Amino acid sequence: MQKNNFDLLRLLAAFQVLLAHSTYHLFAEQGYPLNTDIVIFQKIIHYMPGVPIFFLISGFLIAMSYEKNSNLREYAKNRILRIYPALYINIFLGICILYWFGYVTVNSQFFIWLWAQMSIVQFYNAEMFRGFGVGVINGSLWTISIELTFYILLPILVLFYKKSKSLIVVFFVISLAVWLYDLTSVKEIFYNKFLHVTIIPYLFLFIIGMGFYKFYNALAKYIQGTFLWWLLIYAVFAGIIEFFDITSNSVVVLVQWGVFSFFIFSFAFSFQNLSKQLLRGNDYTYGVYIYHMLIINIFVQLKLVGQMEYLGYVILLSLASGMISWHFIEKPFLKLKKHSLFKEMHR
């Protein structure tokens, strides 16, 4: 299990989010058309959504980490070291950017926003920032709130699993039902908007990831070295969904996520030296993910939009930010862990 492509998979997921946000905020939102090739590419990567991939992988890896060391104090310390050092630097730079463009007023609203960003409510946005860039200084951070909630919830889910496995099934069904509701809900309504940034619609993905870890030995023969088969199956299934426009059918959605999960984990456990060869044990995902919206916001604020060269600059700057964050912030802090999944997976 140590030989896998999780680092590469997460980086690809981060780039999917980066490309989706870049093309929307630099082109579509500004009224600029995209060329046909980009539109086709967007449709393809729409079926490889980065955020759900993160949640699936988190369920697998965090369940693995917790099983290897279930000491709650050390578990909490490891999760804090993974998320908060890089996040705090990111928040500080975001404040600097906002100050430079004249959007920071030190008042109660600012301190409430700052507390939210530094705790577990990263989806909160202060009204004073609505005029800057796309209206939210770093909208991608809403998923950090969900990840942190998953971390808190995992020990409880493990306890429930030991006591009554049927409860996990109930949680799964409720979460999937809420996901279906969220797909078509009107986000202008506060309740729906708030529900969208909670763990409820995404918990089923985390549970699927946990299941793939828990039953890995039984599933191994279906995911190890089988990526090309699952790629073909998923491509055919996605084509059927697109052709018949059946994205909201509950049975179809359930089957889709099942096929998608095998597609994702088969990539993780096929071509098992690929990630090591390409990334050499480096994990630039988190940095790319948390910095790309800061960069996009600067470009939008400066009205550097509507041209492909700007898209290229955003991609390069996001990758550079991810590399700097990894080598100078994330990696040094990860070395402080006593029992590190990172160390085990990169021996």
Image (cartoon, rainbow, N blue to C red):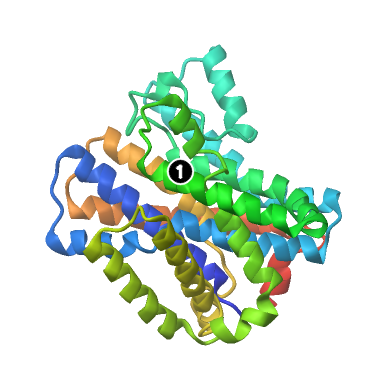
Q: Which residue lies under the disc numbered 1?
A: 140
Q: In which quarter of the image is the C terminus?
A: bottom right
Q: Quadrant of the N terminus?
A: bottom right
Q: Is residue 12 above or below residue 23?
A: below
Q: Decide which of 295, 250 is in the foreground and name it.
A: 250
- Asked if residue 298 lies left or right of residue 226, the reply is left
x, y (%) of residue 327? 58, 59
Q: Residue at x 33, y 48 (%)?
A: 21
Report how many numbered discs are placed on residues in the image.
1
Q: Is any atom of residue 111 visible in this view?
A: yes
Tell me the SS state at disc 1. Answer: helix
Whole-percent x and y of residue 154?
72, 52
Q: Is residue 162 above or below residue 99?
A: below
Q: Which amino acid does label 1 sit on?
A: Ser
Where 34 sits versus 259, above or below? above
Q: Position of residue 338 (x, y in %)?
A: 82, 60
- Name the residue located 70 percent from the left edge and 70 percent from the top edge: 214
In x, y percent, where is residue 236?
31, 76
Horizontal side, residue 156 vs residue 172: left or right: right
In-front residue for pair 141/283:
141
- Image point 44% across, 25% down: which residue? 190
Q: Residues within 10 Å of mark 1 (few under 14, many from 20)?
A: many
Q: Can residue 1 be seen in this view?
A: no
The residue depicted at 30 percent of the width and 53 percent of the height is 313
